[in-house]
Amino acid sequence: MFIYIARRIVYVIPIVLSVALVCFMLVHITPGDPLVAILPADASQELAAQLRAAYGFDRPLPVQFWLWLWKAMHGDLGNSIATGRPVLTEVMRAVGNTVTLAIAASIIGFSLGLMFGLLSGYFRDSWIDKVSTSIAIAGVSVPHYWLGMVLVIIFSVELNWLPAVGAGPGGSGQWGWDWQHIKYLVLPAITTSVIPMGIVTRTVRALTGDILSQDFVEALRAKGLRETYVFRHVIKNAAPTAMAVMGLQLGYMLGGSILIETVFSWPGSGLLLNSAIFQRDLPLLQGTILVLALFFVFLNLVVDIAQASIDPRIKRA
Amino acid sequence: MLTMASAVALPQFASAESVLRIGMTAADIPRTLGQPDQGFEGNRFTGLTMYDGLTMWDLSSATKASVVIPGLATEWKVDDSDKTKWVFKLRPGVTFHDGSKFNADAVVWNVDKVLNKDAPQYDPSQVGVTASRMPTLVSAKKIDDMTVELTTKEPDSFLPINLTNLFIASPTKWQALYDKADGADAKAKSQAAWTAFSKDASGTGPWKMSKFMPRERLELVKNDKYWDKARVPHVDRMVLLPMPEASARTAALLSGQVDWVEAPAPDAVKEIEARGFKIEKNEQPHVWPWQFSRIEGSPWNDIRVRKAANLCIDRDGLRDGLLAGLMVPATGTFEPGHPWRGHPTFQIKYDLPAAQKLMKEAGYGPDKKLSVKVQTSASGSGQMLPLPMNEYLQQALAECYFDVKLDVIEWNTLFTNWRRGAKDPSANGANATNVTYAAMDPFFALVRFLQSSMAPPVSNNWGYINNPKFDELVKKARTSFNDKERDAALAELNAASIDDAAFLYVAHDVGPRALSPKVKGFVQPKSWFVDFSPVSMAP
């Protein structure tokens, strides 16, 4: 197991470097001026050149990349052009908010997904299966920003039960797991959860159906074992795949949904990306993408290791 | 019993804090360190609230054009013998929020923060949003404690107007933060000091910074000691919340989460009004145009074609239909009633037969259409609804034998291309560009587009307009140091540009905002800015 983990970590190094290079290049090859956030429309070429030099954008790209990477390796992602604030602080605060949202959405999405998936798998082709499958398809098909708006209209505007936007009552920056904070989380979390809910439902349904048709299940039943015991076996066999799906979905959620976070003005990584793109704030854009990509790589690593610890066949492969 | 009830209730009433909560269109709180980013929305919320300039805008009238009035300077005068020297008399008795005194040293320090690279407080991040808004200012010198001399690189009567963009921050506060700041060198310490300053800002404005959560909220409290007693805020606290999405802002207003939202979506206006909220709007110094290419071979070099396009647009239809009333039809950069309007002889209006006649005279007709290409964006600051509006123009101009092709590019790219000009490959063969502009001051509104020397790479004369009459009028305006003479010269310049149909003038934005019925005392001036001081909240 130790060798497997070490090998996976070594594999991660070139991935991280490639991610860093792609992050850096993506924002440099797009058209437009990197200083657009602070450079007014009528800025002279002289002023533009002066600011470009002040921010180091006049240096050759390889030099810029090396300086950026060297600093990044030391935990310095530079300062935002638009705000002057350290990028790392900005990103970590936003990621913290997105993690909160992702955890809430995961709890809702995975619980409902598992429940609907197991019900569908166990009661294949019944009305329960049809209802669960319909919910799952709706979950992955409905545009989630539209669903968010509908929820806001119903629960905020019409019923006035929940806040429409924001991430907390006082803007203290400190999240609390109390109703004063959770009520800000409910609508964006439900909206964020619909896609993982749909995907998990469909995955678990397929797995359950497949496992139930296997010989060992027949054998277990033939032995006269109770259905709860059979169910435990089904869960155990379905777990690695379900976990991989969950890990991927969690990764996507940590990446932040630009649309959902914008609709709800949730100050997470999605809204930060939106802002960085809108202001063409290159250091912020690079830093945000890099941190999110690293999160994704890290999550995949964790999921792989967890899968391997559950299912030794994966480790051997 | 009643006495007892009063005794209990009265202290609560007396201590009840009045709060105004505003949903901004910005995705982040505009910079708070003195020179805001995010365009004029930044100036509106974190500039004019916490800071003052030497000169300020009069934002008290909803009917008259906003004009420049004394701010931290009480009077100013250009030197009779050297028109590049200005003397500003400063307002006595003004203090910064940190208690330090405002004086000539503070003015010099603030000019140096953006113009003097050798000054410890020089901050490149503040230069971009400031220097080009006062393009001729080169330095400041203290004459005495309450007098300062400003120098421009050429005679420029626009300086007092441009100075509305220089917000005076507290040098004492900054120095204290600098002394405590960490950093390997003076530059790093300076940057750290500005970062700290942005979290605990100090200006002289009617509002003081109270709580700041980047990207989430900025809370301001009223400055009881503000030098202009008439402008001490009527509410205790103002909370600014970034909400970049129009539907989110609308929902926040309708659910009672905020009391005021900027720029509600046009299609939500009816719903907002039906629920008892107020929509405030007024003509802004803003123009939504097509800026014509005037390089060799451009079809717009024929004045008949330029005039025909201007006569071919039903602007009232655009306002009442697509824009739900949220625009004012444009008949030039400035409209009648503005001191810089003038008396143009060419009247911009909807006159389809006249437009068709002009096009036929120019050699076009139903069987020989004129192909024109315009670069525009799908979104962007001040662009209103660029795609639907351009499609409206496309259809309207088809009636006048134009075949309009739209080249839609990303907003920041369009903005970058704007600086590069019509001859640059980035124009992609377009012979018009659709970039909206602010018309607050003469340079932004007229000079940068009309003066031949403002062609790229210098400034925004994208189409390379080269009209000696414009150049002469720009010079006349710039060197008229009597306000009335300067205004008359600017009016002449504006009228000349309309007579020349220099742009396709389409619309002015109206700066719509939706307010809770609890918001009282608000005046929406003809400006990008508003004065929050007279606003109160009904219980």
Image (cartoon, coloured by chain):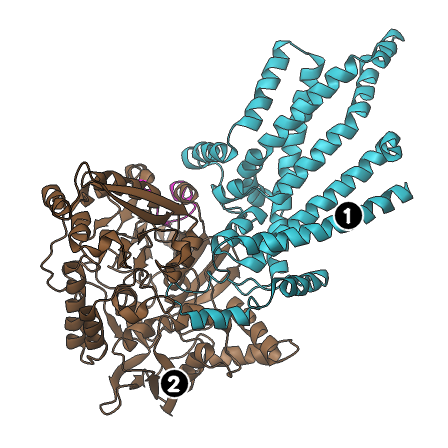
Chain colours: A cyan, B brown
Residue A86 image-quadrant placement: bottom right
For label 2, the SS is strand
Whether tag 1 and tag 2 are in contact, CB under 8 A, the answer is: no
- Whether B84 is drawn above or below B289: the answer is below
Q: Which residue bears the numbered disc 1?
A: A12
Foreground pick, A185 / B479: B479
Q: Are marks 1 and 2 on the same chain?
A: no
Bounds of the magenta segment: B252-266
Q: Position of residue A196 (x, y in %)?
A: 63, 31
Report the amino acid beneath label 1. Val
At a point 62% along the width and 40% down the height, the residue shown is: A253
Q: Is residue B259 magenta?
A: yes
At a point 66% along the width and 24% down the height, the residue shown is: A201
Q: Which residue bears the numbered disc 2?
A: B140
Q: Nearer the viewer, mark 1 or mark 2?
A: 1
Report the amino acid beneath label 2. Ala
